[in-house]
Amino acid sequence: MNFPETLLYTKDHEWALNKNGTVTVGITAFAQDQLGDIVYLELPKVGTTLEKGKTFGVVESVKAVSDLYSPVSGEVVKMNDPLKNSPDIINKDPYDKGWMIEVKVSNPQELKDLLTQEQYQKLVAS
Amino acid sequence: MTDLKKTPLHENHLRLNARMVDFGGWHMPVQYTSIIEEHVNTRTHIGLFDVSHMGEIEIKGKDAFSFIQQLVTQDVSKAKVGEQIQYSLMCYPEGGVVDDILIYPLSTEHIFLCVNASNTDKDFEWITSHKTTQNITLKNSSSEYVQIAIQGPKAKELLVLFTSTDLSKIKYYRFTQGKVSNISMIISRTGYTGEDGFELYVPSQYGSTLWDDLLEKGQKFQIKPCGLGARDTLRVEMKYPLYGHELSQTITPLEADLSWTVKFSKPNFIGKKALMDQQTQGIPRKSVGFELLEPGIARQGYPLYSLQNEPIGEVTSGTLSPTLNKAIGIGFVKPTFSTIGQELYVEIRGKKVKAKVVQTPFVTRHK
């Protein structure tokens, strides 16, 4: 299973990619594999304020409902519209086309709390 | 995980890289590749299911028929011996359901029951507790059988390659005792998918090889092994009840829309009085199928409301229908809200989502 080195991770299986204080968020290959066929997604509207560690949405597969936890605090500035009608994109391409939201980070210090690829890989293996 | 029960096909599932889950104490495959793929393949080609976790209970002796007759809602005397299967319920005196079962009259002195996996021990105790005659023997023979379901439009074409039994003579809900791969077994034209197909009760020791052979010969029919995930979405599309969802100790057959299985004309059976009373007084709730008119997925336990926000019931099963690509569900509502076309709300995480009662099965049954 692939966990890109360029990303940061949460223990709840979200990934975060930081570009100059704007963080793209999605779920990991492990998360999508565990969920199975993703059939429904609930994401926050642009402008919503997120708090690190709090739920920002819901992802549902055929069998399971799972909360999404924000890796950082900040404001949602963009969401991935094509996922609305085709949430299965997340299964096919969790790190690229399957990104969920972009967040303008309010406290860059929080990024330090996230897991590195190596730490996340250990978590998944355990 | 060590205390989970395993079917004799457990190793086969691991070799196929199935995702295994705890299902009512059994370590079972939930999916091999994808629930949706497995579901669609069963509707278009063939799905192969290990349902060995289901229980088998046998009643033998000269009072076998009269004994089972008092325990079930169906009229067992109407079934053609050695040929016809009955879907029936076993009720408590209060009218709630002990289990839903298949009754196979193998002979006039031998009745074979297929019961739900998680209810097997409860059922066996229940049946045993009503034994008053020495003229029957009861046996929980669940561990002696592998049960394999071959389901889908190509199921017959595949099974024909393994048997000299004339399968076209076994109609829907009929069975025969014949040989498949030279192994004697019950061949049953039944299933839980809404497709044509068979369920085989295979002596345990032969199950693993037969499973592999079916998958190999089935390749040309595009067979796929299917897990419990697809089994569930397939049965929801048919609005087939599942114990623990649409059936329970507190839900009666009349509420569950299964009054066709209740034969008030037969002498006496456990639950008859309570069910007759309920039929006279009217049922407090009724099972319906609905589809969501707005985005979301309904799940078991979600509350149902009228458009006037009055609580009217609860969801018992819900999923995305892979065939219709719509969110569908089964629930129980006050009877006044059970008409086709009735709009209602499903409360999903605090939000009211509009739904509509629709005709069921949701998808046309092919058997």
Image (cartoon, rainbow, N blue to C red):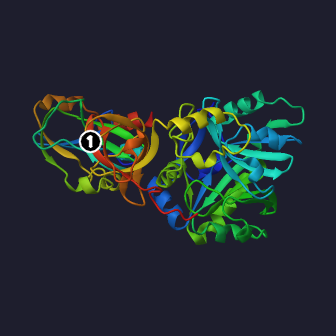
| Residue situated in front as seen by the camera: B312 or A6 | B312
Q: x, y (%) of residue B28? A: 58, 43
- Identity of the residue furthest to the front in this view: B280
Residue A121 vs residue B72: left or right? Answer: left
| The quadrant where residue B182 appears | bottom right
Tag 1, which secondary structure?
A: loop
Percent across and percent down for residue B252 are 56, 37
Figure quadrant of the C terminus of chain B: bottom right
| Residue in view at x 39 percent, y 33 percent | A123
Q: Dot 1: few (<14), some (14–19), or many (≥20) neighbours within 10 Å?
A: some
Residue B158 seen by the camera: yes
- Left or right: residue B317 versus residue B176 is left
Subunit bearing disc 1: B
Figure check: B18 above or below B177 = above
Residue B20 location (% of width, % of height): 54, 43
- The three-letter amino acid code for the residue at tag 1 is Leu
- The residue identified by callout 1 is B307
Image position of B159 (left or right of A76):
right
Q: Nearer the viewer, residue A1 or B28?
A: B28
Q: Quadrant of the N terminus of chain B?
A: top right
Query: At which x and y percent is residue B108?
Result: 85, 50
Indicate the quadrant where residue B209 lies. bottom right
In this view of the protein, can residue B53 be seen by the observer? Answer: no
**Residue A47 found in image quarter:** top left
Query: Of B273 and A28, which appears nearest the observer?
Result: B273
Task: Say above or below: B322 vs B205.
Answer: below
Q: Is residue A8 left or right of residue B51?
A: left
Compared to residue A3, the image places residue B274 above or below, namely above
